[in-house]
Image (spheres, grey):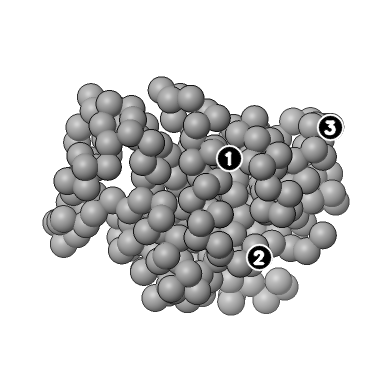
C-alpha cells in the first residue's frame, strides 16, 4: 500500500486565511505551499453538489434555509465570504465540477469529504459524486474520497474499484472493524482529540492514519511519533510546522 497523502493537508483549504471551502481558501493553501487540501461536498435539493460543510446556510447567517429546499441558482447568490471578513464579500460558493477544475489547474491533491445530506437520499448523492468525478478524470493518486458515512463509501467502492477511499471516524473502534477490509481503504482518518497511543499504534500498523484537526506543532510531533502519517491543519503556519519537525 502506498501512502496516499503528504503529512500535512489543508483542512477546508486554509481557513485561517480565507473562508473555508471556497476558491479563496484553496488559493491560500496553494500560496502557502500546501500540496493537498481537504474539502467538503454536499448536495442541494436540485441535485447540485455544492462545496459546503453543513446541510443549511447557517454559516452565512441563514440557519433556517436548508440545502434540500434550494438549488444551484439560489446557491449562486450566496455570499460565502462576508461572515469571515468583509474583504471576502461576494466570494461565491463552489460546485464540485468547479472544484475539480480548480485543483487540477493548481495541481493540488484533493481529499474530497462527502458530507451526506440526511435530508436527501444517500444513493443519489453518491451516484452524483461518482458521475462528476468520472467526468473530471483527475489522476487517481491526486484524489482521495473520505466520509463519516461508510455505507456511502461502500457504494462508491462498488461503483469504482480504483478510487482511493478513506473512512472517517470521530472515535476509532477498539478493534479494527472487519468491514473496513471491504472498503479497501488507502488510509483511515480520525479525530485527534480522543485518539490514544494504543489505538494509533494498532491502526497505523494496518493503514496509514491521518488525524483532524491539528493546529499545534507539539501535538503534530506527538502524533507523528505515535505512527500517524499526517494531519489536517487550519493554519497558514502549517508548512513551517512541518519543516520544524526535524524527526519527521
Ligand atoms: O476530513 C477531516 C475533517 O474535515 C472531518 O471533520 O467536520 O471538519 O468535516 P469536519
Ligand atoms: Mg471535512
Label 3 CB, ligand 1: below 8 Å? no
| Residue in front for this viewpoint, 180 or 15 | 180
Q: Determine whether 216 is above or below 172 in the image.
A: below
Within the image, what quadrant is residue 43 found in? top left
Mark 1 or mark 3, which is nearer the start of the sequence? 1
Say the numbered circle drawn on residue 141.
2
Picture residue at 33% right of the left edge, 61% below the top? 23
Q: Determine whether 174 is above or below 214 in the image.
A: above
What count of labels does the image hold? 3
Q: Determine whether 168 is above or below 87 in the image.
A: above
Q: Nearer the viewer, mark 2 or mark 3?
A: 2
Which of the image's four quarters has the C terminus?
bottom right
Label 1: how many Cα within 10 Å (few below 14, some 14–19, many 20+): many
Label 3: how many Cα within 10 Å (few below 14, some 14–19, many 20+): few
| Residue in front for this viewpoint, 123 or 231 | 123
Mark pair 2, 3: CA separation: 25 Å
Mark 2 or mark 1, which is nearer the start of the sequence? 2
Q: Nearer the viewer, mark 1 or mark 2?
A: 2
Q: Position of residue 197 (x, y in %)?
A: 76, 45
Picture residue at 49% right of the left edge, 41% below the top? 128
Residue 147: tell me if it is visible: yes
Mark 3 or mark 2, which is nearer the start of the sequence? 2
Task: Report which residue position mark 1 lands on.
Answer: 147
**Quick one: SS at disc 3?**
loop
Mark pair 3, 1: CA separation: 18 Å
Say the numbered circle drawn on residue 178.
3
Amino acid at each position: 500500500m502506498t501512502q496516499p497523502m503528504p503529512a500535512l493537508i489543508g483542512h477546508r483549504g486554509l481557513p485561517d486565511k480565507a473562508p473555508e471551502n471556497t476558491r479563496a481558501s484553496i488559493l491560500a493553501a496553494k500560496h502557502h505551499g500546501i500540496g493537498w487540501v481537504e474539502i467538503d461536498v454536499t448536495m442541494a435539493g436540485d441535485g447540485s453538489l455544492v462545496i459546503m460543510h453543513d446541510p443549511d446556510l447557517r454559516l452565512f447567517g441563514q440557519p433556517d434555509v436548508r440545502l434540500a429546499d434550494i438549488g444551484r441558482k439560489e446557491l449562486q447568490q450566496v455570499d460565502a465570504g462576508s461572515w469571515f471578513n468583509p474583504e471576502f464579500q461576494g466570494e461565491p460558493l463552489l460546485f464540485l465540477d468547479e472544484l475539480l477544475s480548480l485543483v487540477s489547474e493548481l495541481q493540488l491533491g484533493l481529499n474530497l469529504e462527502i458530507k451526506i445530506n440526511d435530508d436527501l437520499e444517500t444513493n443519489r448523492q453518491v451516484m452524483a459524486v461518482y458521475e462528476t468525478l468520472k467526468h473530471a478524470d483527475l489522476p487517481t493518486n491526486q484524489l482521495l474520497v473520505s466520509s463519516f458515512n461508510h455505507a456511502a463509501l461502500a457504494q462508491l467502492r462498488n461503483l469504482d474499484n480504483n478510487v482511493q477511499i478513506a473512512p472517517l471516524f470521530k472515535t476509532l473502534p477498539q478493534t479494527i472493524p472487519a468491514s473496513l477490509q471491504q472498503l479497501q481503504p488507502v488510509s483511515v482518518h480520525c479525530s485527534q482529540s480522543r485518539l490514544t497511543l494504543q489505538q494509533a499504534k494498532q491502526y497505523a500498523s494496518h493503514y496509514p492514519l491521518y488525524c483532524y484537526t491539528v493546529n499545534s506543532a507539539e501535538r503534530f510531533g506527538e502524533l507523528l511519533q505515535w505512527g500517524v502519517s499526517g494531519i489536517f491543519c487550519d493554519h497558514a503556519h502549517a508548512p513551517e510546522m512541518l519543516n520544524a519537525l526535524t524527526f519527521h
